[in-house]
Amino acid sequence: MERYFRELKRGSTKMIILSLLERKEMYGYQISKEVRKISGDYFRVPEGALYTALHSLEKEEYIEGRWEERDGRQRKYYFITKRGRNLLKKAKKEWELFIDRLSPFLKPGEILSKKFSFEKLF
C-alpha cells in the first residue's frame, strides 16, 4: 500500500507545479521550498523529479522558463503559459469530479444523499 501512496503523490507533481506557477513565477529551488511549506512537509519533490517535471512541462509548452539575474544570482524562472492555465483548469475540474465520485466509497452513508445515486455509479 505504501507504493500506492508514493505513486499518488508522484502523480500530483505536475499539477502542484502548475498551481504554484499560476500564483507567481518561481525558480526550481523556490518551487521545492513552497511545495514543502504549503503541504506541511507532506509533499517532498526530490530535485531530480522536480527538474524532470519542469522540463517535461516546458517541452509540452505548459510552462516557459527564462534565465534572469536577481539579487546577483542567475536563475531560471518558470511561469505558466495560457496552455498551462487551460490544462490546470481541466485538471482541477477532473480532480473535483474524482473526489466527488470517490467519496461515496470512503463514506458509504453519502451514497444515498441527493448528490449520489446508484445509477450514477454504474
Image: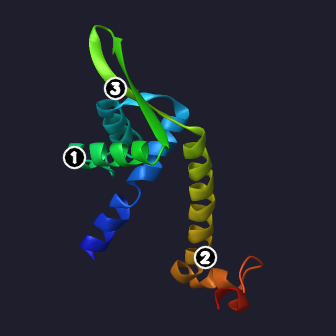
Task: Look at 28% across and 42% down and name the residue there.
Answer: 51
Vertical placement of 3 versus 92: above or below?
below
| Residue 48 numbered tag | 1
Q: Quadrant of residue 91?
A: bottom right
Assess disc 1: are there few (<14), some (14-19) or many (≥20) residues with their C-alpha within 10 Å of its C-alpha.
few
Residue 99 at what x, y percent from top left?
A: 57, 68
Q: Which residue is mark 2?
A: 101
Q: Left or right of 118: which side holds 54?
A: left
Is 82 located above or below residue 114 in the figure?
above
Say which element carries label 3: strand
In the rendered image, the vertical position of residue 89 relative to residue 8, given as above or below: above
Q: Does residue 57 appear left or right of residue 46 in this picture?
A: right
The residue wearing badge 3 is: 76
Name which residue lies at 60% across and 40% down: 82
Please name the amino acid that badge 3 sits on.
Answer: Lys
Residue farthest along the right direction in this orientation: 114
Residue sitting at x 29%, y 64% = 6
| Residue 32 picture quarter | top left
Label 2 to label 1: alpha-carbon separation: 33 Å
Tell me: 118 left or right of 27.
Answer: right
Instruction: Give amino acid for label 1.
Output: Gly
The first of marks 1 and 3 along the sequence is 1
Q: Residue at x 48, y 43 (%)?
A: 61
Q: Residue furthest top?
A: 72
